[in-house]
Amino acid sequence: MHSVQGRPGTNREGVRLRAAGLVVLVLGGCSGPLAFDGSSVSIGATGEGTVRSPVELPVDGDGYTVPPRWRLRHSNYGTDELVGVLVRAARVVARALPGGTAAIGDLSRRAVGASVEHKSHQSGRDVDVFFYAVDGGGRPIAPGEAMVRYGVEGQAVRWSPARGFAPPATPVPACHFDARRNWAFVRALLADEDTEVQWIFIQRDLAALLLRAATEAGEDPALVARAAFILHEPTDSEPHDDHMHVRLYCDPADRRLGCADRGPVRWWKKDWKYMAPPYGRDDGRRAAAARAAAAVRDGELPVSVGAGALRS
């Protein structure tokens, strides 16, 4: 594991975001209907919610694609914020490290609500992203018809097909987890000005590879410490060794309309946006994060980043 890990508005350039229509939500107990302006609204929690006016992620875009078997599920709908940050992050990686393609799996269904594939993904704030991969020579590998599971050192070990499909008949490619591009994608998500990432679910050894890549690239220790809090191996599902599951916080405007965040309330952007290097002010609620960032700066293991700090 990396030393900081615990122990056991949308840019529409090049893309047309199609809203599913203007809706009116009647709130019980209110004096009248509340009319939306046509933008998306995430309502409820990720495991028991919905999204009004979901936005469609086009199946192909700058630096990303939705693989064919995932297109069949028609689960490429989400909030304006989620679709926008995916488009921007894929574009950032494609421009910084040309050659790789982000494979985007499920967001939410247009009709939203529960699905047989997921316990969450109901309110438009969750998305599965395949891992970027490279061959033995370091060349990017295009996404295939299935996800690939990776071992603790980042080596491909077996296929992880879409639900309802058999594994491909071909051998698993001799590829490796592309730590540079995967970190670049995570970095773009965390640096985005218009969204706030709550969790990125990922197997802890693969998360360590990302943090190592960030450290070797000379990233700001505060950013690495922040990523260490957000990169999290889930305790109630598969370890996520074949993809990363990104979850956004509710947009502030959506909270007033019933969007519900569950888990830790780390209002990062409100504080980090105005922080001074290397980790900024400590208002009491962010004490653990500040200590973690300072420990990264000093090359120490932050005692505050333990298993309890990384529960979903």
Image (cartoon, rainbow, N blue to C red):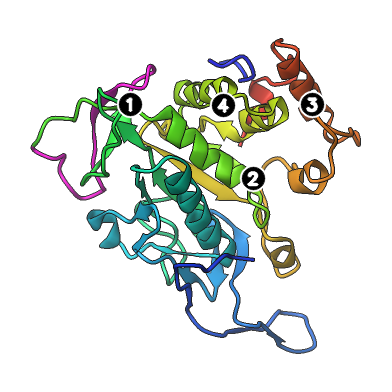
Q: Which residue is mark 2?
A: 191
Magenta stretch: dominant secondary structure: loop
- Judge by depth and name the residue closer to the eye, 35 or 274: 274
Q: Which residue is mark 3?
A: 288
In the image: residue 163, left or right of residue 153: left
The quarter holding residue 8 reads: top right
Disc 4 or 1, which lies upstream in sequence? 1
In the rendered image, the vertical position of residue 264 relative to residue 157, given as above or below = below
Q: Could you tell me the amino acid type at mark 1?
A: Tyr
Please tell me how crowded label 2 is: few (under 14), some (14-19), or many (20+) other residues with Cα within 10 Å.
some
Element type at marker 4?
Answer: helix
Q: Which residue is mark 4?
A: 214
In the rendered image, the vertical position of residue 50 relative to residue 39, given as above or below = above
Q: What's the residue at 28%, 32% (across, down)?
A: 139
Q: Give the distance between the C-alpha atoms of the residues marked 4 and 1, in whole angstroms.
A: 19 Å
Disc 3 or 4, which lies upstream in sequence? 4
